[in-house]
């Protein structure tokens, strides 16, 4: 199993190009199931989850070819099966996103239940309730969701809690439904908006995306798309936090600064100087030690849960005490025990981590438990004295494209060790 070795102690400096957003690319790739016309998606990041998605779509009969400059072409002219098997779904919970488009276009779908998740329960019952409200017959047997509908009907769907993938599944299904669907308490994340904008280029009639109420007027068929994925705000945030932690100066290029407001506000509170251009953000800590900050995760436009671990790492070496409150997932503090192995002073109290900053961390072997936890351990390794070795880096490869190369370009001493 591959590992990443980091020798800490160097301030980061330079510019880093941010890749396309994984959490936007995955549902847009799934949206190719809604049409029999060719689709082309640009700025697709080279990630394990993307490869899994393409393997899943390929098994269903989607013809896929890779172009230049991170382009993917898809053509779902004929679907051979409506089955999303357990061996693929269990490796990536986002596989549930084939359910809505398959059911809407094909009239049937058999999708494995995703199973457990290291960061807490993410039940799919809201997906199923929404599709049932649109007229789908749904049964769960043998670990599989089995759904049928001659044609989905527009409906009012009220989500009990905000769910990104639930909103996306119902949104895609509603584009081919008969009549109008209104999704209330919808997720407002930029990645949901990006999916909606792509669906609109296919001919879908969607309004209200980016608010908590999305209205979809169904149509008989959709065209293909030619679209580019928005930049990854979480990858950008991760590199900017790394700049602050190491006392460095880093410019994140190819970003949408307006999507980073909650993160940039906390970086300013930590003492960083921030310069914003139309498609870039630069963080300059000028060699200073960051100040501790309090963060509380919340659905967009609040502070993103996917940046919680990175700010926990920042607080570990910051001046003062910071409180990190997690409200989205109930088990997203598994990185705390690993940070303690590096010398961090932090305690978990319910859904809050109390972090008392220390002047230095010391390198040690640590183990990644999920995607963002693995990123936070890399950040901690960048400031720790000596060598830090991060095991189970397959988690990182699910969401960060060439992370060791990008950090290396900024001056970090980081390398991947073979299995």
Image: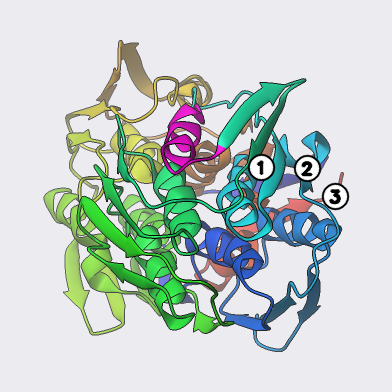
Judge from the rendering whether residue 333 lies leftward or rightward of residue 206; answer left or right. Answer: right
Few, some or many residues within 10 Å of mark 3 (<14, 14–19, 20+):
few
Residue 418's tag is 3
Of badges 3 and 1, the one in the foreground is 1
Instruction: Check the image and report above or below for 99 versus 158.
Output: below
User: If you read the primary sequence from the N terminus, does the residue marked by circle 3 or circle 1 appear first?
Assistant: 1
Query: Could you tell me what secondary structure mostly forms the magenta stretch?
Result: helix
* Magenta extent: 123-136
Q: Residue at x 55, y 74 (%)?
A: 221
Q: Give SS at disc 2.
A: helix
Mark 1, residues whose alpha carbon is within 10 Å: few (<14), some, or many (≥20)? some
Image quadrant containing the N terminus: top right
Does residue 184 appear to the left or right of 251 in the view shown?
A: left
The answer for how far apart the CA atoms under marks 3 and 1 are is 24 Å
Near-viewer residue (76 or 304) = 76
User: What mark, if any, has residue 88 been given in the picture?
Assistant: 2
Magenta-drawn stretch contains 253? no
Q: Measured from the top left, where is residue 268 in percent x and y? A: 14, 56
Q: Is the residue under label 1 in contact with that under label 3 (CB below 8 Å)? A: no
Residue 402, compared with residue 3, is above or below; it is below
For label 3, the SS is loop
**C-alpha distance separating marks 2 and 3:** 25 Å
Say if mark 1 contacts mark 2, CB within 8 Å.
Answer: yes
Q: Which badge, 2 or 3, comes first in the chain's sequence?
A: 2
Q: Could you say which quadrant of the image residue 327 lies in?
A: top left
Which residue bears the numbered disc 1?
92
Structural distance between the alpha carbons of marks 1 and 2: 7 Å
Residue 332, visible in the rendered structure: yes
């Amino acid at each position: 199993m591959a590992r990443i070795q980091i020798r800490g102690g160097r301030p980061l400096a330079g510019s880093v190009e941010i890749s396309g957003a994984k959490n936007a690319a995955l549902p847009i790739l799934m949206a190719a199931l809604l049409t029999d016309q060719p689709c082309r998606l640009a700025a697709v990041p080279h990630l394990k989850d993307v490869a899994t998605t393409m393997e899943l779509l390929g098994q269903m009969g989607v013809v896929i070819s890779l172009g230049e400059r991170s382009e993917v072409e898809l053509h779902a002219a004929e679907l051979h099966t409506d089955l999303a098997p357990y061996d693929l779904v269990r490796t990536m919970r986002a596989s549930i996103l084939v359910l809505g488009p398959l059911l809407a276009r094909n009239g049937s779908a058999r999708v494995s239940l995703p199973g457990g998740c290291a960061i807490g329960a993410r039940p799919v019952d809201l997906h199923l309730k929404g599709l049932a409200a649109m007229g789908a017959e749904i049964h769960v047997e043998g670990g599989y969701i089995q759904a049928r509908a001659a044609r989905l009907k527009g409906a009012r769907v009220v989500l009990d809690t905000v769910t990104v993938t639930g909103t996306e599944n119902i949104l895609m299904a509603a584009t081919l439904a008969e009549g109008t669907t209104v999704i209330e308490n919808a997720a407002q994340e930029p990645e949901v908006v990006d999916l909606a904008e792509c669906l609109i280029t296919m001919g879908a009639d969607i309004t209200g995306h980016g608010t908590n109420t999305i209205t979809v007027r169904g149509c008989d068929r959709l065209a293909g798309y030619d679209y580019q994925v928005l930049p990854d705000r979480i990858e950008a945030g991760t590199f900017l936090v790394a700049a602050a932690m190491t006392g460095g100066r880093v410019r994140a290029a190819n970003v949408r600064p307006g999507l980073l407001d909650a993160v940039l506000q906390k970086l300013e509170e930590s003492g960083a100087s921030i310069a914003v251009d139309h498609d870039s953000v630069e963080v300059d800590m000028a060699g200073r030690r960051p100040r501790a900050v309090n963060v509380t995760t919340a659905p967009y436009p609040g502070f993103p849960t996917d940046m919680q671990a990175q700010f926990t790492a920042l607080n570990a070496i910051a001046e003062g005490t910071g409180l990190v409150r997690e409200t989205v997932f109930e088990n997203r503090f598994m990185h705390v025990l690993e940070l303690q192995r590096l010398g961090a002073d932090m305690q978990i109290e319910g859904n809050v981590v109390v972090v008392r900053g220390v002047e230095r961390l010391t390198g040690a072997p640590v183990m990644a438990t999920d995607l963002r936890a693995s990123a936070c351990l890399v950040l901690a390794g960048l400031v720790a004295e000596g060598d830090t070795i991060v095991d189970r880096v397959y988690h990182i490869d699910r969401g960060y494209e060439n992370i060791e190369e990008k950090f290396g370009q900024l001056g970090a001493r980081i390398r991947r060790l073979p299995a």
